């Protein structure tokens, strides 16, 4: 009972008040607030709301100390500007008493949106956490993975040949990237389903600005259990010398503390497959709904790499990127004060008409498609961007070559998360070549 009261106090102080405020603003018609609360008020298409945010100006206010922007130039500049930092738990309130309550009631779980996660740390701490795994994502290392990605993909496609229909998210889109990252972390392949369940549950926490009490409680419980799971796995790798995985390398290097190792493992697992799975699922929908683009790729397979860039631009997974000013900054005439936050809409930046002609059109031959910001930019640019591109390329090309008459067998179901926007289910009809 004491634990439950503590966790409810933490949620109410750090999430509940913000959630209630956003829901009030959403009911009043604020488009940004509606985006941030789509878990309680689902939206089939988020982009009309993003365009309403853009229509307010290159930057606009969500609340007294919070700015929003869907502008590509501003998004890129802020992400590269050392005067902005990542958001921290203490930023949930400017009042010291609230910050004290949050610290005292912290559930003490491996939360990917709290330090020492790379997502919310800044140099030099961020550099310290990133350096040990950077060598695992070099071009040479990734080239060695290419054959394995093909092998995983081909095996999944063979398994689907006996099926007339399937949920492509559960049986293909999520299984390619998780199979790769599980091997990179030397996790047991037989526990893949458990790891997927952990990711699906915690997405409701990390993909929301202000999670509901139900999602917070459920995610906290899962993360606490997952922490114990990772601790046992780390101990197994520490006791062995034969393993050559990324995680084993980090453990034996001695560069990171115990909690930093577990946080890194959890983050790599989530970032290594959740976002790629979401983009892959939405890419299938986009290609099916644009048969002319798919026909062009069949006629010219060399166009797939650029198609992947357009896919990433057209409908990204990480839609909102928050930053906080560390000093007073003037951004193209907008005065941002120290301590004020900016919620950058990456999906909006990727459809900025100042950068992309006819931004709402899906064009796999778009000349500047690679100018998207789906992998971020600056010191927090995605470490696994090249791996994600490889998995998307191989996964999509192989799928449509194997099932050239692939079609939707129902409406795709979205996960109602703005931070990690993707599909929960994708029913498709399969007709093997």
Image (cartoon, helix red, strand yellow):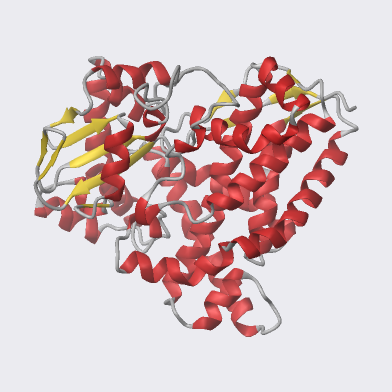
Q: Position of residue 176 (x, y in %)?
A: 70, 46
Q: How far across and how far down the image is residue 349, in percent?
A: 37, 31
Q: Is residue 225 visible?
A: no
Taking the spot 23% from the left edge, 39% from the top edge, the residue there is: 342
- Where residue 162 sits in the image (x, y, percent)? 90, 32
- Residue 310 lies, in percent from the top left, at 55, 31
Q: Which of 147 and 269 is in front in this view?
A: 147
**Vertical arrangement, residue 136 with respect to residue 77, above or below:** below
Residue drawn at point x = 46 percent, y = 45 percent? 375
Q: Look at 62% across and 77% down and name the residue there.
A: 237
320 sits left or right of 366 in the view: left
- The relative height of residue 269 versus residue 170 in the rendered view (above or below) is below
* Residue closest to the eye, 423 or 344: 344
Quarter occupied by residue 26 = top left
* Residue 351 is at least partly visible in this image: yes
- Establish if 47 lies above or below 393: above
Name the residue furthest front.
Answer: 367
Q: Can you tell which quarter of the image residue 126 is in?
A: bottom left
């Amino acid at each position: 009972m004491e634990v439950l009261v503590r966790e409810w106090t933490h949620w109410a102080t750090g999430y509940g008040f913000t959630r209630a405020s956003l829901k009030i603003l959403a009911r009043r018609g604020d488009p940004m607030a509606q985006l941030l609360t789509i878990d309680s008020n689902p939206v089939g298409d988020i982009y009309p709301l993003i365009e309403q945010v853009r229509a307010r100006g290159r930057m606009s206010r969500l609340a007294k100390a919070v700015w929003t922007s869907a502008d590509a130039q501003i998004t890129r500049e802020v992400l590269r500007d050392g005067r902005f930092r990542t958001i921290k738990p203490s930023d949930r309130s400017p009042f010291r008493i609230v910050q004290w309550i949050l610290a005292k009631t912290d559930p003490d779980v491996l939360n990917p949106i709290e330090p020492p996660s790379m997502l919310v740390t800044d140099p030099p701490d961020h550099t310290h956490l990133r350096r040990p795994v950077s060598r695992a994502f070099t071009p040479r290392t990734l080239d060695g993975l290419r054959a394995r990605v093909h092998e995983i993909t081909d095996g999944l496609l063979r398994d689907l040949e006996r099926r007339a229909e399937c949920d492509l998210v559960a049986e293909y889109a999520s299984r390619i990237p998780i199979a790769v990252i599980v091997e990179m972390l030397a996790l047991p392949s037989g526990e893949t389903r458990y790891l997927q369940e952990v990711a699906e549950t915690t997405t409701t926490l990390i993909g929301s600005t202000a999670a509901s009490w139900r999602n917070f409680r459920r995610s906290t419980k899962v993360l606490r259990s997952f922490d114990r799971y990772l601790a046992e796995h780390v101990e197994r790798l520490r006791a062995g010398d034969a393993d050559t995985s990324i995680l084993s390398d980090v453990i034996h290097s001695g560069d990171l503390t115990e909690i930093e190792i577990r946080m890194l493992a959890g983050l790599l697992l989530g970032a290594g497959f959740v976002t790629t799975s979401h983009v892959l699922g939405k890419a299938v929908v986009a290609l099916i709904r644009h048969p002319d683009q798919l026909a062009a790729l069949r006629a010219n397979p060399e166009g797939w790499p650029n198609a992947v860039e357009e896919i990433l631009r057209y409908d990204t997974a990480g839609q909102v990127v928050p930053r906080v000013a560390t000093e007073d900054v003037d951004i193209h005439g907008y005065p941002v004060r120290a301590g004020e936050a900016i919620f950058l809409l990456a999906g909006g930046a990727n459809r900025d008409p100042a950068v992309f002609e006819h931004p709402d059109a899906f064009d796999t031959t778009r000349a500047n498609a690679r100018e998207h910001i789906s992998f971020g930019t600056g010191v927090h640019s995605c470490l696994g961007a090249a791996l994600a591109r490889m998995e998307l390329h191989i996964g999509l090309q192989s799928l449509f070559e194997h099932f050239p008459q692939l079609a939707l067998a129902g409406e795709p179901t979205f996960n109602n998360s703005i931070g990690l926007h993707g599909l929960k289910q994708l029913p498709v009809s399969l007709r093997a070549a």
